[in-house]
Amino acid sequence: MARQFFGTDGIRGRVNRKPMTVETALRLAIAAARTFAPEGGREVIVGRDTRRSGEMIEAALVSGLSSMGLTPVRIGVVPTPAVALLARETGAAFGLMVTASHNKYEDNGLKLFSPEGVKFTDEVEETLEAAMFDAFEGAYAVPEAVAVPRDMTGAASRYVGRCVEAIGRDADLSALNVVLDCANGAAYQVAPEALKRLGARLTVIGDRPDGVNINAGVGSTATGALKAAVLEQGADIGIAFDGDADRLIVVDELGHEVDGDQVMGLIATELHRKGRLRGGGMVATVMSNMGLAEYLKDLGLTLERTKVGDRYVGEHMRAHGYNLGGEQSGHIILSDVSTTGDGLLAALQ
């Protein structure tokens, strides 16, 4: 039976059209509560990006979770990997991110993370989708068990701290002139904060979200503005994130785009040099360039491949002991720190 809600990466579509409606968000919250925390009494991490419809969809999730006796913990505008991190660190029942990634503001979507901070398997999504059809038919929490939502302060800074700690607090980027393109999305606060903590000289674009300009002429899928800024500033590097900052694209000092395959090759080289690369290589998808495999082979390393989707990369990494993997599009998983694609963490490497 064809899926009606879930696609290759959660639920995504045009806002107020099926499947991306408030009703869908409400059904998902109720079905997830029954599936993953049937006894209630636990917390759920809820984050979002900057698009106009985010608060509307967040409100539906909060209502559904509260009605089932789960406490929604709103963490505000954060990158998707921050939801995965906080779900894991707080012992939440699961995490929910409201985002349509690199899509324009007219779209939105929903991504889920397990208590371990990983995306659910196809089998779990199929179970959840079946539960969504019957979401309004089951029982809800008794009145005294209805939960009260709460806001978590400092969630974004906590995430930044984990990313900075991953490369060492004594790291010094003061010699680097960096241009950041935050896509008017979820990275607009955390990415500049992280690079400033490390001393980098910054020029920032795409950091003025207004609800409708996310990914509009900026970000990882529209790098023209970044390339121009790198050349104008004489910068050493340019870094562009997508709307939810779970991936990045790099521009070198000459204004040339460096894709995810090349970035992963550089990270693999450095981890291997330091003796920190596990699994004897890395994991990518069938879309990755053959040149990456040949490059790694010359280093005595292997390239394992999966079908397209960073969650499949992550599943393979966990099953076979790799700590580096990702996609040509710029989703990069550094599993010693993060459980999902993380643009900021990859940028700091």
Image (spheres, rainbow, N blue to C red):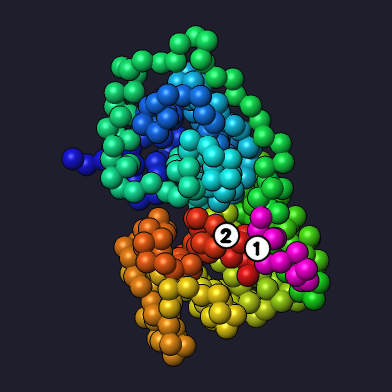
Q: Is residue 166 magenta?
A: yes
* Magenta highlight on residue 198: no
Q: Nearer the viewer, residue 174 or 210?
A: 174
The residue to which callout 1 is attached is 166
Query: Which corner quadrant of the image does residue 327 belong to?
Result: bottom left
At x 29% / y 27%, what residue is drawn? Answer: 133
Location of residue 179 with respect to 37 vertically, above or below:
below
Q: Is residue 300 left or right of residue 334?
A: left
- Is residue 285 rendered to the left or right of residue 222? left
SS for dot 2: loop
Q: Nearer the viewer, residue 100 or 175?
A: 175
Residue type at mark 1?
Ala
Q: Name the spot of residue 271 as percent of width and height, x first.
A: 56, 77
Region of the chain picked out in magenta, as a range: 162-173
Q: Which residue is mark 2?
A: 337
Q: Is residue 303 above or below residue 194?
A: below
- Residue 215 visible to the viewer: no
Q: Position of residue 304 (x, y in %)?
A: 35, 73
Contact between marks 2 and 1 (CB within 8 A): the answer is yes
Mark 2 residue type: Val
158 vs 143, left or right, is: right
User: Gap between marks 2 and 1, in whole Å?
Assistant: 7 Å
- Residue 226 relative to residue 59: left or right: right
N-terminal of the pair, mark 2 or mark 1, is: 1
Q: Point out the image quarter for the N terminus.
A: top left
